[in-house]
Amino acid sequence: MGKRNPIWLFFLMLLLSPAGASVVEGCAGCWSGYGPGDERYNKPLADLRVLYEKEGKAALRAIEETLISNPDHRVKQRAATYIGEINDPSSIPVLEGMVVELIKRVSFGNFGVGTADFQTRLKVAHVLAQMGPGDLADRIWNRYDRLDQLKKSEVPYLLNALNDPHLLDRLLDILRRGKDHQAMVAAI
């Protein structure tokens, strides 16, 4: 029994001693990251910036693909910004599809407020509004205008099913004003 204690003590000293620890060091380039700000530790974000700066409008399809497929919300927001700066009308269906996909992920309890998807949805919708497509909103409102009065009166009841009177009042106020198509589409 006396021989066991020194063996355990020896193993305990090996485990706790700093001599067994290894130190990892990197070169100055490794510690500088990929770029300034958010890009410092986010390679896809830095790669997207480099692609946009080098190719400009020629990189539109690659930027659209990044917007659709990249899981990082900061990369999606940056891609939406670049699409807005390029301002090519052929990107409008891609942006509309992206907004629809992001809205599908929203829970109606809180409309996704405060989530990363919410920020991405705001950014994509903002770029879409800047590019000025009225087609989607006009189609929705033409369809709404063709409904008979009975169907139109069902809209408040559907909104009331959300069980949030403040939200209901705000959405109905937007619908009653009828000024901003993008806000009306979002309210619907």
Image (cartoon, rainbow, N blue to C red):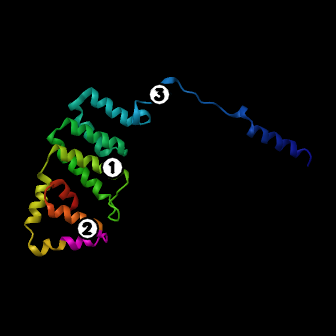
Q: Which residue is drawn at 25% across and 28% down?
A: 55
Mark nearer the viewer, 1 or 2: 2
164 inside magenta stretch: yes
Residue 111: where, in percent of width, then height?
32, 60
Give the residue at mark 1. 119
Name the spot of residue 62 as percent of width and height, x first: 26, 36
Q: How far apart are marks 1 and 2 (CA)?
A: 22 Å
Name the residue carrying label 3. 32
Compared with residue 15, is residue 32 higher up or lower down, i.e. above or below? above
Q: Quadrant of residue 175?
A: bottom left
Given the image, on which type of amino acid does mark 3 rest? Answer: Ser
Q: How crowded is mark 3: few (under 14 residues within 10 Å), some or many (20 or more)?
A: few
Residue 16: x and y in percent read 74, 39
Q: Which of 174 and 100 lies nearest the eye of the viewer?
A: 174
Give the residue at x 24% y 33%: 59
Image disc number at residue 56: none
Amino acid type, mark 1 = Gln
Q: Name the residue under label 2.
A: 168
Q: Give the image location of residue 128, x and y in percent.
A: 20, 46
- Towards the viewer: 180 or 138: 180
By secondary structure, the bulk of the magenta-drawn segment is best described as helix
Of callouts 1 and 3, the N-terminal one: 3
Q: Give the range drawn in magenta.
A: 155-165
Amino acid type for the residue under numbered disc 2: Leu
Q: Residue shown at 19%/42% (left/top)? A: 91
